[in-house]
Amino acid sequence: MVDALFPPEFFRALERCSRARALPGAGRAAAARRGSTSPGFERARYATGDALAAVDWRASARRDTLLVRLREEERGGELCLVLDRSASLQPGQPRRDQDQRRLALALGWLRLEAGGSVRLHAGSPPLQFSGFERRSALQEALRALPAPQGSDAPPAAAAARGARRVLVLTDPWCGEPTWSFLATAARRCAQTACVSLILPEEDTPPQAALDVTAVEGGGSLRADLDAGREAYARRWEAWLAQRRARAAACGARLVEVRCGRAGASAAHILETAGRAGLV
Amino acid sequence: MFEQPLALALLLLAVPWLVWARRGAPRPWQVGGLEPFRGLPSAGGERRRWPPSLFLGLMGLACGVAALAGPRWRGAPLLRVEDHSLSSLGGWDLAAAPQRRVAGTVVVGAPDQPAAEGEILAALRVHGCGARTEIVTDRPAPRRAPAWLHWRSPWPQAMVSNAAILAAWTEDDGWHVHWAAWNLEGPLWLAVEGQPRLELEGAQGVAELGAVPPASLISLQASSGQAPDQRPADDVWRVPGPLALDLPPEADPRWRAAVQSALPEFTFQAQAGHRLPIRFVPDADAQSVFFPGDPFARQPELEAVAEIARGLAAWRARWGGAPRPRSECEPPGAPLSWPQDLTAVQPVAAGGRWLAAAGLLLYLAALALRSRGK
């Protein structure tokens, strides 16, 4: 019987990601196990917001593109995965819920393969996974998660303590509690990121009159997306930009990942997350 | 439940109506948050996936279809058309009829006067029977009779054979009986007071019975002595009792001898069953015999007796009783055809009218609401 949440094609894509991380180039040649040598530097493409002091001018001249020098990401350490399981994660269709769990498994899987550990916050109490052989336990824990419900309930700020990397997998609708957690986590952990999973229907809702209902927090209104298509596009982009700015203000990086449409391959989230540099 | 259940299929019109009404209706759409949708066209309006105009319109359609189908409920009042002609009354048993609430009764025909061919149809047209109408008659249901009409026979079985005494009268040589038989096998007998007296041959004829005592019962019998058919009402004929003449006080004493010699069926006894007044001056009583003065006072005795015999002979012929219509005794032939436009003049039942009116009002209300965008 084929597992709909984690089908074989997902693990084949995950295997490809795992092999790609071991290939040399752009600082990705670090050993799978933590070595005794000091960590060096790695280079990445310049992105808006990077400090000019971090630009590696020589390497940029050689590659003919702007590169910044970053501390080489050390393999191992603890990855703190915070899953936003509020009702807004699943507005009608389960695609974002599935992709969140797939992405969480991929991130945790790779971290465990690299010799690190994973702490999963998807409600209380948190689950701790450590060791290569605990990958299947992580998979089962993610499979057993209850359906999204209620409102945002991030863990206490102390949950980020001791983590080498903090990743919050959420949606574009997370509220003030999540931002507070991100701000606190960013002060304690340099590698704090917020992954915003966006549904295709949120980018381009149906061009028709809609009775819009908010699954989290309630409320409803009528909107004519046929006449207000361009207005919605502007408002949606402004909404996302506002959230990027809010994440930056919190000191965290906001990564927007587009989920697949209903019926798309389960490996789609790994492809989009790979393009975003998450896996 | 309904007179025309097939008309309920018109309720399927609600399906395209629903599709048409919901064509431009907003789709339900669940999202994580409302912020990007605020301020868009039509935003902020209240939710109305099923507008009230649609509900009212559908209710109007349901009322209209129900009115068209002709609602009928058990125990509801109905209008009954009763055929009181001789052939129907022979099997008519009101006590055994189903006890229903009858809103009204229209009687056609009478025991001595059969209902005309178009009388039932005329009763339907005039009295507006509507969908709840019952017709009780022994006549066969006409072709093209509408389905909303309940045609009920007072007899458990249709008449296919019969024998009847059509008329009886007295002449100088005694009683004569006009009889007829249809589709009967075996000989028939004419009996007086149950005693066979004369064997009959053929399908019909006039039998001469001779003298029959007053108030006797003449009947048709089969050879077994039993009634020849299942409808004995027309198999018997009661001979009337003596007809008593009521003479005025100034009548000549020779009246009695004249009457007894010319018309022996008449008597002057006060206790006789029927009394026939004799008048020498005109009056308003139609049941009296008028002579312009006492015949014995105006002319010789023989002429006076002849005038008295002529004046009373017509009453003697009527004394035997009115003849029975042949159509009341004959087994019915092929059913008649009713005009096809009967359904066009079919009155709508009261309940149907109310339903139709309610449906129209609901439909108009739906149109008014829809014009206001509700």
Image (cartoon, coloured by chain):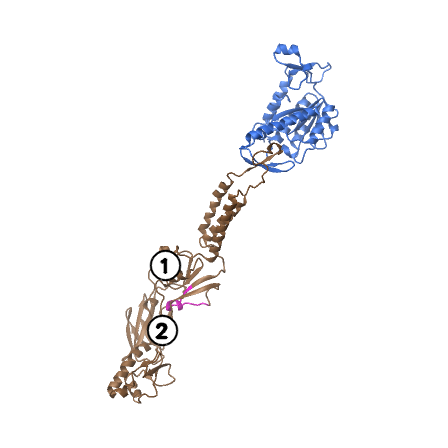
Q: Position of residue B65 (x, y in %)?
A: 47, 50
- The quadrant in which residue A75 appears is top right
Q: Is residue B304 above or below residue B87?
A: below
The image quadrant that residue A116 belongs to is top right
Q: Quadrant of the C terminus of chain A?
A: top right
Q: Is residue A18 above or below residue B252?
A: above
* Badge 1: chain ID: B
- For label 1, the residue is B142
Q: Label 2 marks which chain's residue?
A: B
Q: Position of residue B344 (x, y in %)?
A: 39, 54
Camera sees residue B71:
no
User: Is residue B207 something one can see in this rendering?
Assistant: yes
Q: Nearer the viewer, mark 2 or mark 1?
A: 1
Left-right relation of A39 to B15? right
Does the magenta segment cover residue B279?
A: no
The chain in blue: A
Q: Residue at the spot x=24%, y=85% of the render?
A: B303
Identify the element where label 2 is drawn. Answer: strand
The residue carrying pointer 2 sits among few (fewer than 14), some (14 to 19) or many (20 or more) residues within 10 Å by Cα, namely: some
* Image position of B171 with respect to A42: above or below: below
Q: Position of residue A169 (x, y in %)?
A: 66, 28
What residue type is disc 1 on?
Pro
Chain identifier, brown in the render: B
- Residue denoted by label 2: B236
- The residue at the far bottom in this view is B253
Callout 1: 10 Å neighbours few (<14), some, many (20+)?
some
